[in-house]
Image (cartoon, helix red, strand yellow):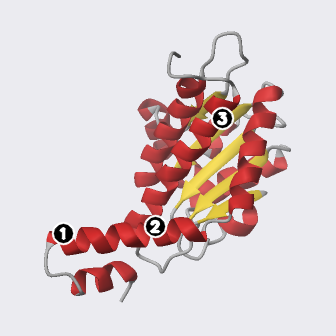
Amino acid sequence: MNRLEKIYSNSQSGKDYARGYLSYLTELCGTLDLAAIEKMIGVFEKARDNGKTIFMAGNGGSAATCSHFAEDLTYGTIVDGKKPYKALSLVDNSAYLTAVGNDEGYENLFMAQLRPLFNAGDVLVAISVSGNSPNLLRAIDYANNKNGITVGIVGFDGGSMKNACHHCVHVSTLKGEYGPVEDIHLILVHLITTYLAFRLGKTKRD
């Protein structure tokens, strides 16, 4: 029985479940490696300083997080007169995704997109709850071999991605707890992008 099942079994109402679920999210936030988050921030800032591109890749709910992350990192941090962040989500071009999936297989979905776009020093952010998605592992291997920087954002036990990436932020939970892991991943998106925006001097007026 995972933590969510225990929370539900101890709940008498939706209110009880909400209280337990939110308490669990607070607990998970407290387990995050803040030094790993700091390293990720440093990777992003270095990429911006050097004019490099930050690519995002993920499946399912993590794909939605990629789109959100890329938007917040580019548009959400814009400050007039300051060099912008360049971020691109690899999950948003449906024509490209279906062409690669049809011609080369789903396991090559992201690697095939990196081939014409990825340069040495670019960053690949791979987001996966399980940390074991074959298409992400192939993309990570490609980026590593092209002298890129790879960053994993994972859950459960970290999977193979935990060791395949140069940097990793791990939300450690029992297998099957997709919702809480994805919740924390989205918190990381907002935490990192708002910090980077403030670093550039962004204010409410912007």
Residue 104 at what x, y percent from top left? Answer: 55, 46
CB atoms at circles 3 and 1 under 8 Å apart? no
Farthest bottom residue in view: 1
> To which quarter of the image does residue 165 belong?
bottom right
Q: Earlier in the sequence, mark 2 or mark 1?
A: 1
Name the mark on residue 196.
3
Task: Note whether residue 16 is visible.
Answer: yes
What amino acid is found at the position of numbered circle 1 in the picture? Lys
Quadrant of the rendering where the N terminus is positioned: bottom left
Farthest front residue in view: 204
Name the mark on residue 26.
2
Q: Residues within 10 Å of mark 1 (few under 14, many from 20)?
A: few
What amino acid is found at the position of numbered circle 2 in the picture? Thr
Residue drawn at (53%, 27%) of the image: 76
Residue 148 at what x, y percent from top left? Answer: 80, 43
* Residue labelled with disc 1: 15
What amino acid is found at the position of numbered circle 3 in the picture? Leu
Mark 2 → mark 1, Cα distance in angstroms:
17 Å
Mark 3 → mark 2, Cα distance in angstroms:
23 Å
Residue 32 at what x, y percent from top left? Answer: 61, 66
| Callout 3 secondary element | helix
Residue nearest the observer in this picture, 3 or 66: 3
Residue 107 at what x, y percent from top left? Answer: 56, 55
Residue drawn at (66%, 70%) of the image: 160
Q: Indicate whether 51 appears above or below 22.
A: above
Mark 3 → mark 1, Cα distance in angstroms:
36 Å
